Image (cartoon, grey):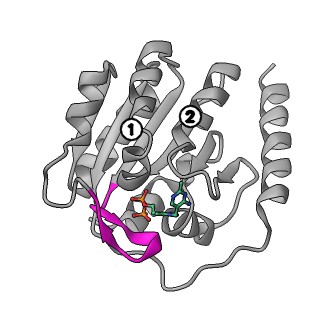
Amino acid sequence: MLRSKCLEAIYSELNDKIVVTIMGACAQELYDLGHQENFFYLQHAMGLASSIGMGIALHSPEQKVVVLDGDGSVLMNLGTLATMARYRPRNLVHIIFDNGSLLSTGGFPTHTTDGTTDLAVIAQGAGIPHVARVGTPFDFMEAVGDAFERDDLSVIVAKVEAVGPDHFGMDFQLPENAFMFKRAIREMKLGDG
Ligand SMILES: Cc1ncc(C[n+]2csc(CCOP(=O)(O)OP(=O)(O)O)c2C)c(N)n1
């Protein structure tokens, strides 16, 4: 399964949601589908996409927040799963694309590469109420559909190939993205209320 295809499949569902991605390949693949002001591509702070997503989710309980993460990033901040479970933002969906690789920085192996570490089991052990591990596009779409539908915290570990884009580049830098994103959240809140 390819992450780019997974993103393509859910892209039309993201218009009305707040989306935070990790940096690098995942961010580029989402950006290439078409930037929206409700997308934030976290740079530099590897591992913290879910922490930022959780903060936004707790602050904006009426909005669905989607975090697009990677195995290497989650492994740098494993405590995030326990923190998410404890505060349990019911509007947060955390999708971990597990390609067993630090793909964006050269493809070095991670602890999940040969199956040593199982992030879905860790998420369950951390107390996440709904955890799915998927490896086919059909199962991915079903798990995402359920997670978007339910009013509870969900983690989806999607096993994908270690394949990324053949180019990198966006039309703006992090500060501009951050200001646009903040305004988009405010406008979504106003539109809601
Ligand atoms: C603290 C920190 N260490 C290292 C990096 C460099 N870095 C940026 S992306 C990345 C790999 C991310 O791996 P993963 O989350 O598995 O996503 P993938 O690139 O495989 O899509 C690394 C090591 C960083 N940005 N911050």
Comparing 101 with 189, the one in front is 101
Q: Does residue 173 appear to the left or right of 139 in the view shown?
A: right
* Rendered residue at 31%/39% (across/down): 143
Q: Quadrant of residue 171?
A: bottom right
- Residue 102 forms part of the magenta stretch: yes
Q: Does residue 190 appear to the left or right of 99 in the view shown?
A: right
Q: Position of residue 186 (x, y in %)?
A: 84, 33
Neighbour class for label 1 at 10 Å: few (<14), some, many (≥20)?
few
* Rendered residue at 38%/38% (across/down): 145
138 up-or-down from 67: above or below: below
Q: Of callouts 2 and 1, which one flags the residue occurring earlier in the amino acid sequence?
A: 2
- The alpha-carbon separation of the residues under discs 2 and 1 comes to 23 Å
- Total numbered badges shown on the rendered structure: 2
What range of the chain is rendered magenta?
Answer: 98-110
57 up-or-down from 2: above or below: above
Name the residue beneath numbered marker 2.
51
Q: Quadrant of residue 147?
A: top left
Is label 1 within 8 A of ligand 1 (CB to nearest ligand atom)? no
Specify the farthest residue to the left.
Answer: 115
Q: Position of residue 154 (x, y in %)?
A: 39, 29
Comparing 80 with 3, the one in front is 80
Where the C terminus falls, by quadrant? Answer: top right
Name the residue beneath numbered marker 1.
145
Comparing 72 with 30, the one in front is 72
Q: Position of residue 174 (x, y in %)?
A: 76, 59
Q: Amino acid at mark 1?
A: Gly
Is label 2 in a helix, a strand or a loop?
Answer: helix
Is label 1 in a helix, a strand or a loop?
Answer: helix
Q: Position of residue 13 (x, y in %)?
A: 54, 46
